[in-house]
Amino acid sequence: MNRREFLRTVAYASMWAAGQRCFGWSLTTEPLGGAGLDEGSGLARAELEKMFDAIAAAHAKEPFIVTRTRWLAALFDHVRLAANANDAFVHWFADCDLPGRRCWLRLKAFSESAPERKLCGKWTTATNGAWRARLDTSHTCPDWESILALGPKGLADRARKRRETAKTDDERLFLDCVTEVYDALSRLCVRWAAVAEKRGMPACAESLLAIAERPPRTLREALQLSLVYDRGQEAEGECVRSQGLFDRLYVTFYRNDLAAGRETRASAKALIADYFTRLYAQGHPNGKNIGFGGYDAEGVPVWNELTELAFELHDELNRPNPKLTYRFGKKTPREQLEKVTRCLANGRTSIVFANEEVLDEMFRRRGKSAEDIVQYVLVGCYEPGIQGREIVASMAAEVNLAKPLEAVFNNGKDFAGFPVGPACALPENAEAFEREYLRQLDAMITSAVETARLCERSWYDLNPAPFMSGGYRDCIEKAKDSSQGGCRYNQSGIMCGGIGTVADSLAAVRALVDEQKLVTMAELGEILRADWKDREDLRLRAVRAAPKWGNNDDRADRPAKRVYDAVAARINAEPNGHGGTFQAGFWSIDLDKPFGDCTAATPDGRKAKTPISRNNSATAGCGKEGPTALLLSNAKLDLAESADGHIADVILPASLAKASFGAAGIAAFLRSYFEMGGQSIHLNCFDPSTLRDAMAHPENYPDLQVRVCGWNVRWNALSRREQLHFLATAEAQAKP
């Protein structure tokens, strides 16, 4: 099998393996707390399955977008609906996974048709944990402005009108499909209104009937439409990972309601509380991101009545989800920032902070207009994108930065014999080692990029999205599906994890081999191959004496910057497979453990099959100089080149979170980092002693949350291994 055939095989294997993650966000059969399903409101699952089979057979010779459209329309017309009299809104229906699951099964069948089927399985089988590429459909921010301005009927009418000027059969087919799914969504709202009325929810029923016919006019109608649309897109199989810039999208509805006497501040707050609760009740594993703040088109910081209400509620509700993004910059008033950081001081840590100035520069370098930049959000965890204008696809590939370290010692292969990069001689010194590491890494990234591109070139055939695409104004203007590059910006992210492990390893090679001459390069390679067996003395020397990233130590920070610069230059602006470019991201979420499981021992003293460093943090237990030093290390990087996102992952000591000092102290800490050039940051605020006590007495901490990656979880939901890993990081960062 030649290189291209191999990459094609890996693409299919990775797509199959990742398919359930891409299409599976909506697979929850019942949201948290139940939902009041009306069994008589639609067809049972088995009957829907038969209907879907018939649709697939009837349209087998037509483009797949037709089948997918008919599946979704059939679901909207016949699915069983839920309504709970205790809720202000409806938000869930049964069997919402069926269209997405059907696409996943189609993807699986496509995978099985690839050569060398034996590679299809766990992604590690294909690349041994070096990298993974896939079709990422799980990171989107809908065009909420269009959705709220038009409503389902208006979205359908927009597509009808555009069809009048369509020039090709493909354009007309796409627009017909959009019209069909949004006509069906209007009918779904009417059906859902009947169920709500039956359950004693007249206000909800009235809202549903209204948005079936026209755009929303009230806050209640707008929030209900958001939830209906969210469920529709996720039923299609495309995950909604951002609810948009909340305080900009909904403030006019709020103000109009108060002026007309329809709502008071208290009643509107109750509606928003229920909206947040409905998002939480969906049980989304990684949370829904909602944006606030930032600068408007005139460069004025945004802070309005809904910004205030939302953070009040975040503090009061104390839930992991939804998670909030707060955009701020040099012009943001101190008192506004402190209102947000007060939540952190109270232990409400499901907030990411984004830097207006750095992200403005990042977007400008990527060719995005000033008009669009003011509408940016963080999609998913940390990934910056333009609300309603951009497909982020932020995890088109995931790269294990630590893996090429093995290849340098083993002639371009990892210690298990898997080819990572080109054949190479063993370097003689640390400088040559770093050069060879970068060469191996470049080859590995090339494979990941090429494979991701192959995945994306099959996107339209495997996964057209008429519902999601129909919401984007640019897709309608171009008369082109989002999978074909219909959005204004069609980017794809290459996520790179483990920079701390790499920086520490490069520094350790210099210290152990060149400077202290404790071991030769060949001897170090054999020691790592044996996982430090019988050389615990040297391992501890590597852990304790060699420089470490995240401590403001140039001996580790300089190699980190060289790796960072090389990766960004290699990935940014590389053409992707759907009309845009790839973007480099420096974060790992929770892949530090699976990457580590596939990585041999590394020169920094890390043992085989243990986690690599997470996000851009110091290696667990090695951030000895505290959070300020960690941020100083990160600020040495040109973070405007992290086009797919960069996150500083910080644990602050509890002394900063005390009520007398907390909000102001945390705000000053954040502002200092942003003035140094930081891009985004999230924080935990507690003492390690709290975590140790929570491990010993979990019954006393039912509501303790920790920010583990790009989302929050309750402490008691973590495994023992995860708790210990988290505790080690907290203890190392305990310095103020």
Image (tube, rainbow, N blue to C red):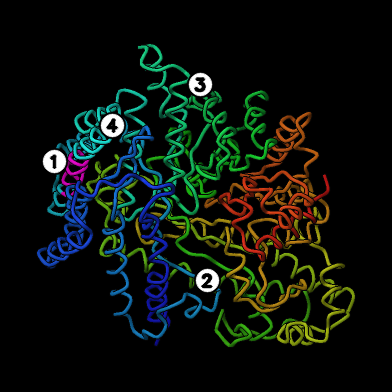
Quadrant (top left/top right/bottom left/bottom right) for the C terminus: top right
Quadrant (top left/top right/bottom left/bottom right) for the N terminus: bottom left
Between the residue at mark 4 and the residue at mark 2, the CA separation in whole angstroms equals: 52 Å
Q: Amino acid at mark 2?
A: Trp
Q: Amino acid at mark 1?
A: Thr
Q: Which mark is residue 305?
A: 3
Mark positioned earlier in the residue sequence (4 or 1): 1
Q: In the drawing, does residue 548 fall left or right of residue 297?
A: right
- Tell which tag, 1 or 3, sits nearer the viewer: 3
Q: Amino acid at mark 4?
A: Gly
Q: Kindly identify which residue carries mark 2.
A: 131
Mark positioned earlier in the residue sequence (2 or 3): 2
Q: Amino acid at mark 3?
A: Glu
Q: Kindly identify which residue carries mark 4.
A: 200
Q: Which residue: 39% across, 63% down?
A: 135
Q: Which residue: 63% across, 85% down?
A: 415
SS assignment at label 1? loop
Q: Kindly identify which residue carries mark 1.
A: 165
